[in-house]
Amino acid sequence: MSTSAAANDADPGTAADVVGLAPSAAGAGDARVATVRGEAMLVMPPDLYIPPDALEVFLDTFEGPLDLLLYLIRKANIDILDIPMARLTEQYLEYVELMRRRNLELAAEYLLMAALLMEIKSRMLLPRPRAMREEEEDPRAELVRRLMEYENMKLAAQKLDALPVLGRDFLTVEVWIEQAAVQRLPQVRAEDLMAAWQSLLMHARMTRHHKVTREELSVREFMSVILRRLQSGQFANFTSLFDVDKGVAVVVVSFLAVLELVRESLIEVTQSEPYAPIYVKLAHAQSE
């Protein structure tokens, strides 16, 4: 019965999970010839046939020659910036030889890398004058650059694969609603309305004119002006309803007019979120 050579990291329990051969130094009272799924086999079946490849341990699969080189470097705990080419080339050629016996087409790109490794090894062994050694670039530089780029791409691919994927890690849920939901605007808080009013009042005080005049202002008149501004049915900014350049009195009367229109349900005051701008529109008006 023949057994193929295994890679360094091959799983030793691959064949032992099914069949366990009895040790040669077993005691005289133990007549087991094998163990099949935990049960002792005392007699070898006369018609037992074991194929030549039954106990073959498959070599680790790699995505390419760079993947194999990176595996050998990390396994031997070698500094990637100072690679011992002789030892690395020897281990690489051993793996390529095993792979060449199994699949010639798959070994083609690995043979190309083997030729490159032997070329680098030869260039490092050849004697060179001191001046040439100082000026010539390290023959391993290009290989190191390719290995580092490949390792970075491999790590990035592993991070991407670890992210949640739709259909693999989670599923989406869709719920169909027969009736359309009515849009509900959030209520305006009294604190936000007060803050807007104080901002307008402060701005009006900063821009007021020092003139002593007496002017009669009508709240109803300003209510009509505000309704005309909102006649388009679209939302208008709360501050745009006030003409702060005309003084504090006009701003106060305009604010009273807005409050009166809200009380009579002629306009609506809305706000998307706390401390957000306040908007005003005609009640029951369809905004575009």
Image (cartoon, rainbow, N blue to C red):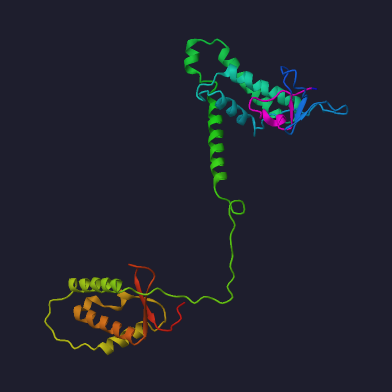
> From this viewpoint, is residue 274 visible?
yes
Q: Quadrant of residue 230?
A: bottom left
Q: Nearer the viewer, residue 177 or 88?
A: 177
Residue 42, quarter of picture: top right
Give the total number of marks visible in the rendering. 0
User: In the picture provided, is 259 more to the left or to the right than 175?
Assistant: left
For residue 263: magenta? Answer: no
Question: In the image, is residue 18 part of the stretch drawn in magenta?
Answer: yes
Image position of 272 with respect to 39: above or below: below
Q: Main secondary structure of the magenta part?
A: loop
The residue at 54%/27% (across/down) is: 144
Q: Tell me where the magenta segment starts and ends, as one range.
A: 2-21
| Residue 251, horizontal then vertical, whole percent | 23, 79
Out of 230 and 256, give the one closest to the viewer. Answer: 256
- x and y percent of residue 28 in the render? 75, 18
| Above or below 156: residue 225 | below
Residue 68: x, y in percent?
A: 62, 28
In the displayed structure, would residue 275 be above or below residue 165?
A: below
Q: Residue 74: percent from the left, percent from the top?
A: 55, 27
Tell me what residue is drawn at x 26 percent, y 83 percent: 256
Left or right, 102 with reference to 239: right
Nearer the observer, 96 or 119: 96
Q: Residue at x 56, y 30 (%)?
A: 147
For residue 103, say whether it is visible.
no
Q: Which residue reaches farthest left?
A: 212
